[in-house]
Amino acid sequence: MKLADLLRNELAGHGRMSYDAARDRYAELGVDSDAAIERALATPLSVHCWQADDVVGLEVHEGAMDGGGIQATGNYPGRARSGDEIRRDFEMAAKLIPGTLRVNLHAFYAETGGEIVDRDALQPEHFTTWIDWCDANDWGLDFNPTCFAHPMVRDGMTLSSEDDATRRFWIEHCIASRRITAAIAERLGRGTCNIWVPDGRKDATADRMGPRQRLIEALDEVLAEEMPGVVDTLESKLFGIGVEDYTVGSHEFYLGYTASRGCGLCMDMGHFHPTEGVADKISATLPFVSPILLHLSRGVRWDSDHVARFNDDLRAVCDEAVRSGHFDEIIWATDFFDASFNRLAAWTIGERSVRKALLWAMLEPHDLAAEAEHAGNGHAKLALAELRAELPFGAVWEELCARGDAPTGLAWLAEIARYQREVLSGRG
């Protein structure tokens, strides 16, 4: 069968599986598939806006900028070039993604009416269009200071810089970002303000303690004022381009800082060693740090933000989150950017994969597995783990898509193709 024939069958609904039979099979194992569908649909997923424009932003600026370790590769046509185009693309993708959505916004997507407004001077009014748009679509809005791609990234450093003026600039930018998040929260409800800085050194670092002491002092100042409705999180990283030898804000650094300061920790799936699993860190961290913000992405060979897929790593993270009993202390967001193929398709594949993995975790016959483990029945526990591959998960996923008013199977590809022809092809 050729792809075109397959897509025609998908659009006609051929091969659709029986949900009633699947529901009965899960019920035999003590799993309420209806409840799992509703829970998975209701879980907010914060979708990053920067997939649409390859992390370029909307700033009006002067002078060259340091990318700060951020790089989207590829030159697929149709990149969004304005806030209106990003919003239009997001609206299209949202029709293909089932479940509750939020928008995740970086500070350099400010819309300043053509005026140069540096990041330390940003105000809530520079994001009015974004706030109004989210309000009209019943989407929440999360925020991030943009501590990269700016001339004030000096020698790879921002909040931990030895230079007082550089450090002051970024402190003021992060404070401004928290105030913007507070204004968003006042209008739309609670929002996350996630801080990531690229600070580090390329090779043979001599002083590792000094930058970390300065980062502690800078963060203490940034977080000193209580901001109503703001959930503060700090994001670690293994390394970045040009700072391969030493990262100031490592996982261990932020784990200690957040545990001692009472704020949240962000763990990005692409910000750890390739052989290091994020799933086990959830139950190891939650007794000491809450909330946890998960940036769902996919590392390939090195720290890279590939499109999230329904793979072992993503399923393991969702499994652990559901099993932990602290699901409500976890914030779900995505962070990937790929310019090598259709950007809306990247959004759709990544976000649907996350929603699918959440459903997969919520359908696990976990109570039976836990019972077997507590009884010392290891072979039964392992057999239950193997059974998951035999269960009619696909039928439940199709039902979730139907209830979420989103296409099933590959039917969404037709909408992407239409949008490519009618909208993206005209962007040059």
Image (spheres, rainbow, N blue to C red):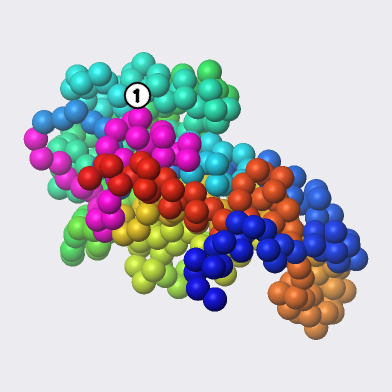
Q: Residue 332, percent across and down?
A: 56, 46
Q: How many callouts does the rendering have?
A: 1
Tell me if residue 100 comes above or below residue 54 in the rendering. Answer: above
**On-image quarter of the C terminus:** top left
Q: Please say whether residue 144 is visible from this viewpoint.
A: no
Q: In what element is the residue under mark 1?
A: helix
Magenta segment boundaries in residue numbering: 63-92
In the rendered view, would you say 154 is above or below 26?
above
Residue drawn at (9%, 35%) of the image: 63
Furthest toward the left, the residue is 63
Q: Is residue 84 magenta?
A: yes
Q: Which residue is painted at 55% across and 47% down in the image?
A: 96
Give, as a three-letter code, the residue at label 1: Ala
Work out whether residue 45 or residue 381 is closer to the camera in this orientation and state it: 45
Residue at image coords 56%, 67%: 6
Q: Nearer the viewer, residue 92 or 255?
A: 92
Magenta-highlighted stretch: main secondary structure? loop
Q: Which residue is mark 1?
A: 176
145 with respect to 183 (left or right): left
Task: Give the x, y percent position of residue 398.
Answer: 69, 56
Q: Nearer the viewer, residue 94 or 266?
A: 94
Residue 69 visible in rendering: yes
In the picture, measured across the screen, residue 428 lies left or right of residue 399, that is left
115 and 199: which one is in front?
A: 115
Residue 390 belongs to the span the image colors magenta: no
Residue drawn at 24 percent across, 56 percent down: 75
Q: Is residue 130 left or right of residue 12?
A: left
Quadrant of the image containing the N terminus: bottom right
Label 1 environment density (alpha carbons within 10 Å; few <14, some 14–19, many ≥20): many
- Residue 307: percent from the left, percent from the top? 43, 58
